[in-house]
Image (cartoon, rainbow, N blue to C red):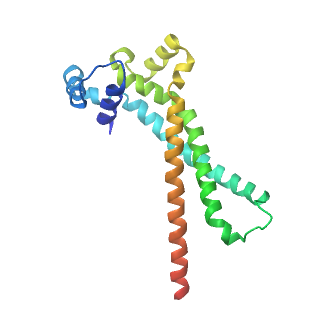
């Protein structure tokens, strides 16, 4: 994925004026060689590994706490039974948990994403992760480590929430089907 990401980031930036995606790829290959397609790969790995772990941790905690809160707060005067509530309530809890977890994990790991983007756009200027981070802080201040946070948070929150809500729903339905099948035997 790295070569595609590097081409995409550079093509979308205002720093380069490529005529096409193919022009971007050819230019990177000409000026930096094959190595140019992997600019920022260290920062990407350091961003993605903690993000995944933090996301799952926050997701499970949010899901547990929101489920406990849901049982304390009545939703209507005509309270449905636990079985009637389970589907819609768990989907809404899963979705909200996904949004919250992605928001928190994204905010924590965004400095690595900002460094990765700078390395992908201007690898010669920034060199490596440590140099890039220092230079960003020196030239643009600590806030530069949170460049793009709003857009990244919105994208990650919605995609993660949707994916995990669907995943949890598929698992729930598979378990129900398995229970019905086992009840027959």
Is 163 situated left or right of 33 in this image? right
Q: Can residue 50 be seen in this view?
A: no
At x 50%, y 41%, the residue is: 156
Residue 157 placement (x, y as % from top left): 54, 42
Is 85 situated left or right of 135 in this image? right
Residue 62 placement (x, y as % from top left): 65, 49
In the rendered view, tell whether residue 48 sits above or below residue 137. Answer: below
> As rendered, which of 37 and 85 lies closer to the eye?
85
Q: Is residue 12 visible?
A: yes
At x 26%, y 23%, the residue is: 18
Work out which residue is located at the far front of the displayed protein and give it. 77
> As rendered, which of 140 and 169 lies closer to the eye?
169
Residue 139 placement (x, y as % from top left): 49, 11
Work out which residue is located at the far top of the displayed protein and give it. 139
At x 47%, y 14%, the residue is: 135
Number of numbered discs visible in the structure rendering: 0
Work out which residue is located at the far bottom of the displayed protein and give it. 185
User: Residue 75: which quarter of the image?
Assistant: bottom right
In the rendered view, tell whether residue 95 sits above or below residue 145. Answer: below
Residue 22 placement (x, y as % from top left): 21, 31
User: Residue 71: which quarter of the image?
Assistant: bottom right
Q: In which quarter of the image is the N terminus?
A: top left
Is 177 situated left or right of 12 in this image? right
In the rendered view, tell whether residue 176 sits above or below residue 46. Answer: below
In the rendered view, tell whether residue 84 sits above or below residue 183. Answer: above
């Amino acid at each position: 994925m790295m070569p595609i990401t590097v081409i995409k980031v550079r093509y979308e930036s205002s720093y380069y004026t490529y005529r096409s995606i193919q022009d971007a790829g050819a230019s990177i290959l000409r000026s930096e060689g094959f190595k140019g397609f992997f600019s920022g790969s260290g920062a990407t790995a350091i961003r993605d590994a903690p993000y995944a772990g933090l996301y799952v941790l926050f997701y499970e905690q949010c899901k547990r706490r929101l489920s406990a809160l849901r049982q304390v707060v009545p939703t209507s005067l005509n309270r449905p039974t636990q079985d009637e509530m389970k589907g819609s309530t768990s989907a809404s809890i899963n979705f909200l948990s996904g949004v919250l977890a992605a928001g928190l994990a994204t905010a924590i790991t965004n400095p690595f994403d900002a460094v990765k983007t700078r390395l992908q756009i201007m690898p010669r200027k920034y060199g490596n992760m440590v140099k890039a981070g220092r230079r960003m802080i020196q030239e643009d201040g600590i806030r530069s480590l949170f460049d793009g946070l709003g857009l990244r948070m919105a994208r990650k929150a919605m995609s993660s929430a949707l994916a995990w809500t669907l995943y949890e729903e598929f698992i729930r339905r598979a378990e129900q089907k398995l229970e019905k099948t086992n009840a027959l035997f």
